[in-house]
Every structure is written in C-alpha cells, then in structure tokens.
Image: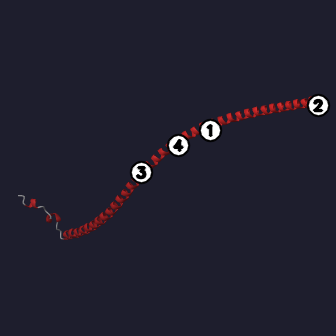
Amino acid sequence: MKSEVLARAKAKAKRRSEHMENLRNRAARALQDKDAQIGELRRQVDSLRTRNLSLRSDLAEAKHALNRKDVQINHLEGELRNTKAKLERCEGNIYHLNKELRENKMVYDSQLSSLTRKLDALTDVVGKFQDFKIQPQVLFRPRFQENHF
C-alpha cells in the first residue's frame, strides 16, 4: 500500500512535472511570439517616425511655398490696386479731356459760324464792289505804296 501510494505520488509528480514543462514551453513560445510582435511593432514605429519626419519636412516645404505664394499674391494685389488707381486717373483725364474737347468744339463751331457769316458778308461786299466795277485792290492798297515817289 505504501508502494502504491508512493507510485501514485511519483506518477502525480511526473504529471505535474510534465504539466509544468508544458506550461514553461507554452510560456516560452508565447514570450517568443510577444518578442516577435514587439519587434514588428518597433519596425512599424520606426517606419511611422520616418514617415512622420518626411511628412513634417513636406509640410514645412509646403508652408514655405504657401508663404511665397502669399507674398506674390500680396504683391500682385498691390500692383492691381495701383493699376486700378492709374486706370481711374486715366478715365478721369479722359472725361475731362472729352469735356474740354466738347467745349472747344462748341467754341470752334461758334467761331466757324461767326467766320462763315463774316465771310458771307465779305463775299456780298465784294460782289457789290464788282457790280460797281470797283477793284477791291484799289480800296485796300497798302499805305507805303501811296507815299512812294
């Protein structure tokens, strides 16, 4: 009986020993799997860090380019404002020139009308002189010729 108890105890101890060995093996495999997962995650983190640095560099370049474009836009907007101001001044000058041209045309038309009336009157006078057979050159002879010899 003692030997039976002893045999059962040895068998139980052997089973426990095998069970413990199995647990150790499983734990070792789990540890290896976790180490592999940690290694993979570290590679992914390194890859993400590299990508992050690259994206930050790209972002910095994009911001710099955007700032340059903003400066160009501001410059072009300034040129546009200056050009609009020049255009408005030109339009004002054109308006005043057109107004002056209209006024001058009215004056010249009035003067032309007046001169036309005077020419018509002179033509009538010349026609009357010709009716009397009087030469207009005699009437309008320069004085310096009268006093000559």
Which numbered dot is residue 83?
none
Percent position of residue 85, x then y: 38, 55
Amino acid carrying label 4: it is Ala
Q: In 3D space, how far apart are the residues under numbered discs 4 and 2 (Cα atoms)?
A: 88 Å
Q: 10 or 59, which lies in front?
A: 10
Q: Is residue 89 above or below residue 39?
A: below
Give the quarter of the image for residue 93. bottom left
Residue lying furthest right in this view? 1
- Image quadrant holding the C terminus, namely bottom left
Dot placed on the residue nearer the N-terminal end, 4 or 2: 2
**SS at circle 1:** helix
Dot placed on the residue nearer the N-terminal end, 1 or 4: 1
Q: In 3D space, how far apart are the residues under numbered discs 2 and 1 (Cα atoms)?
A: 68 Å
Amino acid carrying label 2: it is Met
Dot placed on the residue nearer the N-terminal end, 3 or 1: 1
| Crowd class of label 3 (few under 14; some 14 to 19; many from 20; radius 10 Å) | few
Which numbered dot is residue 48?
1
- Image quadrant holding the N terminus, namely top right
The residue tagged 4 is 62
Percent position of residue 114, x then y: 26, 68
Give the quarter of the image for residue 57. top right
| Crowd class of label 4 (few under 14; some 14 to 19; many from 20; radius 10 Å) | few
Q: In 3D space, how far apart are the residues under numbered discs 2 and 3 (Cα atoms)?
A: 110 Å
83 relative position to 128: left or right: right
Percent position of residue 117, x then y: 26, 69
Dot placed on the residue nearer the N-terminal end, 2 or 1: 2
The residue tagged 2 is 1
**SS at circle 4:** helix
Percent position of residue 91, x then y: 38, 58
The residue tagged 3 is 78
